[in-house]
Image (cartoon, rainbow, N blue to C red):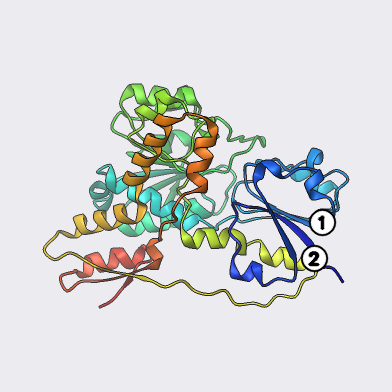
Amino acid sequence: MSKPRVVIDSAIRVTPRLRALPIELVPLVSTDISRDALVDAQALLTRTVTRIDGRLLDGSDVRFVGTASAGTDHIDLNYLAARGIPFSSAAGCNASAVGDYVLAAIALCGKLEPILAGAEVGLVGYGNVGRGLAKRLAALGARVRVYDPWTTQFDSHVQETDLQGVLSCGVVSLHAALHHSQPFPSFGMIGVQEAKVIGRDTLFINAGRGGLLSEEAALYLVERGVDLVLDTWPNEPRVSLELLKGARYATPHIAGYSETAKNNATDFLIPPLIETLELEDHGAVPQGESSHTVLPFGSTDDSVLASLLSSVGRIEADDAKFRAAWARDQGPDTFERQRREYTMRQQLEELLVSGEASSLRLNGWLEALGVTVRH
């Protein structure tokens, strides 16, 4: 009996668990995933760069679609449901990595000390990323305000508020899903009018989806002198050169790019793939090794934490590399190449730290962030 044929975007990592399945894997670059390429395929594993709808799948034998991403705005979910094609996303696969990126941006832009002293942080969206980030921010001492009209359950360490209440905070970070669904569509939810609420001394971070923030609003914030950290862009993979120059830090949609997140993006899709295609699962996933870091002697708790966050987030180096690449070629292929060739980061939860001078206060922060502390 022939093995089920599974077409996979070649940018998706083939993990040991996926490789062990009794399937025929057919890796294709995203631009080559077409109706003809899906002939005789029983499943499709894709990314956000491929539009999944009737134009692609009509007449195919595809019985399962999975996207190695949290976002699903590139998927015609109604089409899949109408044809009884099971679908799964990798929602939550990169939640910790994106949270690490946001914490690194906060540290780099000088907002960590105020947060440790109880400053307000506003989060738009309370899904996997927002919920995990809120928990860590609250553990550091921040007062966390959240806007998410689609959520009814909020944890005790956050304050539910309206969009204006979130945008008035000293740090604002976007993590909502991107969609047109009524009554609260998120596409362009922050336009120029909403941006007028944001203070000049605010740190504004978009490591969610580019379409949440209009380009006009982003440029308005630049003109006002607001610190912008942009990992996602209003019209990506096309990036406004004016907006790029105006951003304090700019990266090419890689906030969730860690070794663990990359593996998760694949492995989260395996259980529903196994169920749909009725495959045999050989189980265990190898665990990665922790990276050991020795904390510096004689530094303040705040500076040690800021240094560690910045090191893990790697935003400064990624910003420099992205700007240099964009200066050479401002085409959309450059944006995708930066993502495709990105060297994955570690996550805070993969770190093992030790240091004779580390205080109980610092150890408490680190453990709250998921870092393993050797006492």
Where is residue 243 shown, x and y percent of the image?
41, 26
Tell me if residue 133 comes above or below residue 222 in the rendering.
below
Tell me if residue 163 comes above or below residue 267 in the rendering.
above
Picture disc at residue 277: 2
Residue picked out by circle 1: 63
- Name the residue at 56% across, 42% down: 149
As drawn, is 235 to the left or to the right of 179?
left
The amino acid sitting under disc 1 is Arg
| Element type at mark 2 | helix
| Element type at mark 1 | loop
Where is residue 73 shown, x and y percent of the image?
65, 41
- Name the residue at 76% across, 42% down: 34
Mark 2 Cα shell of 10 Å, populated few (<14), some (14-19), many (≥20): some
Where is residue 102 shown, x and y percent of the image?
39, 48
Q: How many marks?
A: 2
Residue at the front extreme?
328
Q: Give me the C-alpha separation between circle 1 and circle 2.
A: 8 Å
The amino acid sitting under disc 2 is Leu
| The C terminus - image quarter | bottom left
User: Mark 1 or 2 closer to N-term?
Assistant: 1
Tell me if residue 84 comes above or below residue 170 in the rendering.
below
As drawn, is 95 to the left or to the right of 266?
left
Mark 1 Cα shell of 10 Å, populated few (<14), some (14-19), many (≥20): some
The answer to whether the residues at label 1 and label 2 have Cβ atoms under 8 Å apart is yes
Image quadrant where residue 205 sits: top left
- Name the residue at 65% across, 67% down: 18
Task: Between residue 111 and residue 350, name the one nearer to us.
Answer: 350
- Name the residue at 33% across, 23% down: 224
Observer able to see residue 373: yes
Observer able to see residue 125: no
Where is residue 334 shown, x and y percent of the image?
50, 36
